[in-house]
Amino acid sequence: MGHQFASPAPGLSVAVYLYQPGDGGLDRVAILLANHLLSRGVAVELWMTRIDGKNAHLIDPDLVVRRVPAPGGERRLSMIGQFPALHAMVRRHRPDILYSAGNQSNMLAALACLGTRTQAVARISNPIVRPTQPALSAWARLKRFRAITRLSALTIVMGEHDRALLTDSGDVRLLPRPTVTPAMERARATRGTRDPLAPIRLLMAGRLAPQKDQATALAALALLPHLDWRLTIAGCGPLRDRLERQARTLGIADRVDFLGYVGDPDRIAALMGEADLLLQPSRWEGLCATLIEALACGAGVVATDCTPNIGPILAAAGQHRAVPVGDAAAFARAIERALARPATPALMTHAVRDHGVTSALDAYLRAFASVARQPERSPIPSPAFP
């Protein structure tokens, strides 16, 4: 590490709550945050219901990990059932901050801090109102998010649209997503000039689940038989068999490579550094980490309007505007236009310059320090709480 970082809050203690170290973006961000706080000398612990998962290998071995007891069953019900245990842990260990990794746990964390000195910090990891959501459902969802914001000391959002929806409900701050790693910067730096005779290299990265809607991208690619493209899909999930069948039915199976789960961040960066385009056909997203990663690696992006938060990034990066969710024909046309008019890697990386992992995580630390109750606290030994 370069210069010595002066912590903005000596003695600060943080508990990062994560249900389990799964394969999603919010899981990865929570673990990176906990690791980073540890490296900055913060007394930090990772509180989880389950300690097994795809991203468990990313947890720093020096990080204190505590299990939050929970009843069995479906995840959402399990989280509701563990409220008494989480509340008891907050009262026992008394962290200054209880950070919730994402939408599902925000209410749980806020309620667990009631009646204690611990400040709840919520993170909005998916859109507050999803595209095409019915009006009544959208209204109820917005009311719920505003209630959580009022209960929390701080709510972190990833886009100006989400901040505008919540700004009158409490302390809401737009922070960069900690996404761009040194490996991605190296991938961009070593990116070669595209060979016009080589196949077009396309990439999709993400869980094979309805939210990511890889089926729309496959349908779009079937409309482009005149282009010499090859698609790599990195990710695992319940829809893999269905997507493989769809590729065979569309007659494009020989052009699609299913890699399965890729847990090595350097490997993901290498794949993006080799791709001409990242395809992001999601039905809803908070900000789209893979979109930022691809741009950082110098790959273009074709995305759906899965969140208003990506519009400014696409425009700044010289990308095609987002296309309607689920519209395969529009997605196919956007692929053609993106290939015909690629933006420069320099423009793309400039658009995501604020999302570097270290600087973004330091912004989280400063935000935590600003809401923590600092005066008259006894020193807390790192990394454990008293």
Image (cartoon, rainbow, N blue to C red):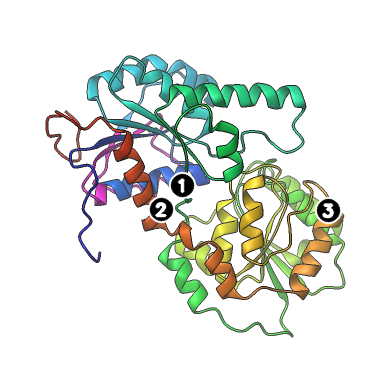
**Of callouts 1 and 2, the N-terminal one:** 1
Above-or-below relation of 4 to 9 = below
Give the x, y percent position of residue 138: 70, 27
Q: Amino acid at mark 2?
A: Ala
The residue tagged 3 is 328
Q: Amino acid at mark 3?
A: Ala
**Of callouts 2 and 3, the N-terminal one:** 3
Q: Residue at coordinates 51% horizontally, 46% vertically from top-left?
A: 25
Q: CA distance from mark 1 to mark 2?
A: 7 Å
Which class describes the residues within 10 Å of circle 3: few (<14), some (14-19), or many (20+)? Answer: many
Magenta span: 38-65
Q: Amino acid at mark 1?
A: Leu
Q: Residue at coordinates 27% horizontally, 22% vertically from top-left?
A: 117
Q: Residue at coordinates 62% horizontally, 63% vertically from top-left?
A: 316
The residue tagged 1 is 175
Q: CA distance from mark 2 to mark 3?
A: 35 Å
Q: Secondary structure at mark 1?
A: loop
